[in-house]
Image (spheres, helix red, strand yellow):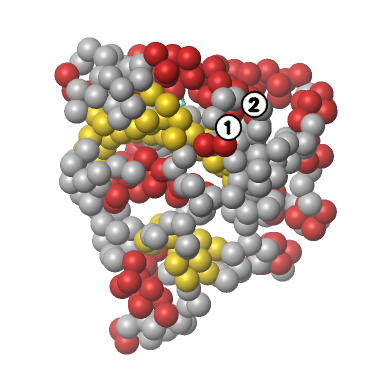
Amino acid sequence: EVQRAHEQQRPRTARVNTLKMSVADAVAWLSSPPPEHSRQLPQEVSIDELLPDVLHFPSGTDLHDHPLVQSACLILQSKSSCMPAHALRPEPGWGVLDACAAPGNKTTHVAALLRGQGQVLAFDRDPKRLARLKANAKAAAAFNVEAQQADFLSLPLATDSKFRHIRGALVDPSCSGSGTVRSRMDHLLPSFARQGKPDNLQQASQVDGNGRKGDTSASQDDRSGAEADRIERLASFQEAAVKHALLLPSLQRLVYSTCSVHERENEAVVAAVLPAAHRLGFHLVDPFPQWHRRGIAGSVEGAEKLVRVDPYEDQTDGFFIAVFKRVKV
Ligand code: SAM
């Protein structure tokens, strides 16, 4: 009962796997199930206004056992986690590298945006998670994905000819996951969602539509030393991963994303890599000019080009996206 009550708080979203089914066919199927699936109820469904392959369903809709989900025509994915692949704007035929790829939600999304033309080189250092990625790619008919177990930082990106055709890179590294706390807690703590965000996230995610922030320093003081250390370690890896990916010789566009709300993992990472990015000819660009929530003003040069998604205000998981585009070689 409690779980059902909380599942009803946010609208559900799913991504149409366009490698298997068009968005129009998916909407038609869902709204009016074919006769051979007469036991399926018609669904109320609409297409997201920003992301053309993302569908919205009324809150409380449970699609886990739906035939379109079982056949990987629909992939259950939050709207915000579908934003990075679109922000990359991969063109069919491109080589794309996914640095920290498992379980592969964004990998298969990129493969779909490539329309099966081109290649996605997907890396993850965790063998079990990589096995899940391979299974997910196969189920999704993402046959242009080549997955390999590797520590991304040890890959010879600048010298190995295997990387010479890579034009796009997705860096979605391990992060604190603080932007997904609400979805995870909704299932655990009955009173949580009713009471609003927990104290230690109140200020950390308090960024308004113009990117002005509340006082994040107070929330950082509250955070335990161990948590602060963990975030610092994560941020060091995040910075190293972005800097490493920028070394790809033919790279045109790089997307850095996290599902964290912490400035240290987001704008501060961008600030740390920006000098190296500029030296290599990259600049920040805005992937979604129509989006309303921006990077924290004053945190980094170009904060207005950064995208933030607030887990309490935007009806989906908290996310952060930065796009680096090479403007000169
Ligand atoms: N992009 C994935 C998706 O959309 O399904 C989620 C990626 S998850 C946030 C981060 C991943 O980074 C984890 O699977 C983790 O094993 C991997 N990872 C962490 N450190 C790594 C490293 N040094 N090299 C490669 N992968 C790494």
State the image quarter where residue 302 is shown.
top right
- Is residue 146 visible in the rendered structure shown here? no
In the image, is 113 to the left or to the right of 87?
left
Q: Inspect the image, locate mark 2, and give the three-letter code of the amino acid beneath it.
A: Ser
State the image quarter where residue 207 is shown.
top right
* Quadrant for the N terminus in the image: bottom right
In the image, is 290 to the left or to the right of 215?
left
Percent x, y for residue 105?
40, 46
Task: Characterize the local packing of mark 1: few (<14), some (14-19) or many (20 or more) Cα atoms within 10 angstroms.
Answer: many
Instruction: In this rendered view, identify the residue nearer to me: 73 or 98.
Output: 98
Q: Is mark 1 within 8 Å of ligand 1?
A: no
Percent x, y for residue 221?
81, 23
* Quadrant for the C terminus in the image: top left
The residue sitting at 59% across, 25% down in the picture is 300
State the image quarter where residue 179 is shown.
top right
- CA gap between label 1 and label 2 equals 7 Å
Q: SS of the residue at dot 2? A: loop
Instruction: In this rendered view, identify the residue nearer to me: 229 or 267.
Output: 267
Q: SS of the residue at dot 1? A: helix
Quadrant position of ligand 1: top left
Instruction: In this rendered view, identify the residue nearer to me: 189 or 242.
Output: 242
Residue annotated with mark 1: 303
Circles 1 and 2, Cβ within 8 Å, touching? The answer is yes
- Is residue 23 visible in the rendered structure shown here? yes
Point out which mark residue 299 bears: 2
Instruction: In this rendered view, identify the residue nearer to me: 118 or 329.
Output: 329
Q: Is mark 2 within 8 Å of ligand 1?
A: no
Percent x, y for residue 247?
33, 17
The residue sitting at 81% across, 39% down in the picture is 199
In the image, is 131 to the left or to the right of 285?
left
The residue sitting at 78% across, 41% down in the picture is 202
